[in-house]
Image (cartoon, rainbow, N blue to C red):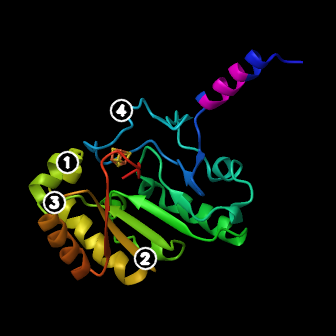
Amino acid sequence: MNTINEIEDMKIEQRKLPALSYQYKDALYLNITPRCPTACSFCIKFSWEYMYRNYNLLLPKEPSVEEVLATIQNPERYSEIVFCGYGESSYRLLEMEKISLYLKQHGAKKIRLNTIGLGNLINGRDISQELARFLDVVSISLNTLDPEEWKKIHRPLPEFKEKGFESVIEFIRACAKKIPETFVTAVEMGAQDKEKFENFVLKLGAKARFRPFLDEYESV
Ligand code: SF4
């Protein structure tokens, strides 16, 4: 029989293993890639050393569809299942689709992608139609209407610098036409900027959402 201290040590060891899925409130989040097209200035993965509320989200390698699914029991009990880890899930479009379709067949209520919005550039084509086959919600992190500021905030890799901002805007517009709900997020800003941001996003066909800095992490 293990002592209480041994059990506690085992729990800590368990938490150190990379989490492919993790629960926050009543939603389940999926961590399927460590790759990012950006090094966002607001990202907490560096300062929190890839931990998130006791989960280790540092993936040594990309997990297979089967490995991710093996970590999920009873998908119907979550309010939603969200692709959102310390990486950009759009790098794994095919795997996202396979995971989502399986989860929906097994009772998942809602599937959401949190993204930095560079999926079209990452995949070299407009992926909105493909996303629409399995997503109920997409949440795109934009944070500013100024292309130069966008570069400063998101610090894109060289290949995403020049066309990045424009591509995110096009991505929002395309998703808003095809996916049931498209949100565009920004860290809280002043009332005037907020109104401008909201109006801009509305014209793209989407809805704006503001979040407090570091209050609630949304991968992106
Ligand atoms: S916020 Fe998301 S896309 Fe940006 S660096 Fe962090 S994990 Fe990558």
Q: Within 10 Å of the Cα at label 3, are there few (<14), some (14-19), or many (20+) other Cα atoms?
A: few
Q: Nearer the viewer, residue 102 or 188?
A: 188
Residue located at (56% from left, 65% from top): 97
**Amino acid type, mark 2:** Glu
Dots 2, 4 in contact, CB < 8 A:
no
Measure the alpha-carbon separation of dots 3 and 1: 17 Å
Q: Within 10 Å of the Cα at label 2, are there few (<14), some (14-19), or many (20+) other Cα atoms?
A: some
Counting residues from the start of the chain, the first of labels 4 and 3 encountered is: 4
In the rendered image, which residue does mark 3 sit on?
Answer: 190
Q: Position of residue 7 (x, y in %)?
A: 76, 22
Residue located at (26% from left, 65% from top): 168
Q: Secondary structure at mark 1?
A: helix
Image height of 214 relative to 150, above or below: above
Quadrant of the frame with the N terminus? top right
- Horizontally, is 155 left or right of 81 in the view? left
In the rendered image, which residue does mark 2 sit on?
Answer: 181
**Amino acid type, mark 1:** Ile
In the rendered image, which residue does mark 1 sit on?
Answer: 153
Residue 110 shows which numbered tag? none
Q: Position of residue 131 (x, y in %)?
A: 46, 71
In the rendered image, which residue does mark 4 sit on?
Answer: 46
